[in-house]
Image (cartoon, helix red, strand yellow):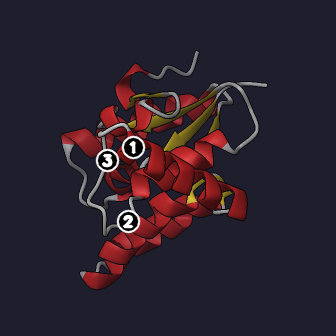
Amino acid sequence: MSRAVLLDAGLLGLVTNPRRSAASAACAHWLQELLAAEMRVIIPEIADYEVRRELLRAKKMKGLAQLDALADLLEYLPITTAAMRQAAQFWATARQTGQPTAGDKTIDSDMILASQAHTLGITDVVIATTNVGHLSRFVSADLWRNIKGS
């Protein structure tokens, strides 16, 4: 089986943005290359939530339609109880080691995203992101441009 690539919220927002910038076009091209190489590309529910809530707040219906279309095209990874329990463990570990990834009163979406990757049950999984720091302490994460389809 090929590598599984989970998209973080930043990438998901970039690739579904209807206002095509150079960065969003490059990200969309990168995604097409992964799909052409038959890589498993996954939208984690927590990333969908982060992007969707902002699109709804800002009443950006075109962006929301793009997000829905991409969710229909790619694999979607729902949040499970196992993932939430693992996220709680990651959150506690980060604080016990003095390296919190978000404020104590936040839900800490990065820990939920990392736990979704961790509990997916496959060995070759990576989170494609624009910010490797927090995630790579718990799971494999890399800058999206570094992840190749071949």
For marks 3 and 2, the one nearer the N-term is: 2
Q: Nearer the viewer, residue 12 or 65?
A: 12
Q: Position of residue 13 (x, y in %)?
A: 35, 56
**In the image, what residue occupies the spot 46% across and 43% down?**
93
Label 3 SS: loop
Q: Name the residue type under label 1.
A: Gln
Image quarter in which the N terminus is found: top right
Above-or-below relation of 4 to 87: above
Label 2 SS: helix
**Of circles 1 and 2, which is in front?**
1
Horizontal side of residue 24 vs 34, given as left or right: left
Above-or-below relation of 13 to 5: below
Horizontal side of residue 24 vs 116, given as left or right: left
For marks 1 and 3, the one nearer the N-term is: 1
**In the image, what residue occupies the spot 60% across and 42% down?**
117
Label 1 SS: helix
Q: Name the residue type under label 3.
A: Thr
**In the image, what residue occupies the spot 24% across and 81% down?**
58
Q: Residue furthest left?
A: 21
Q: Which residue is mark 2?
A: 51
Q: Position of residue 141 (x, y in %)?
A: 45, 30
Asked if the residue under mark 2 is in contact with the one under mark 1, i.e. CB atoms within 8 Å, the reply is no
Q: Tag on residue 96?
A: 1
Crowd rating for badge 1 (residues with CA inside 10 Å; few <14, some 14–19, many 20+):
few
Q: Name the residue type under label 2.
A: Val
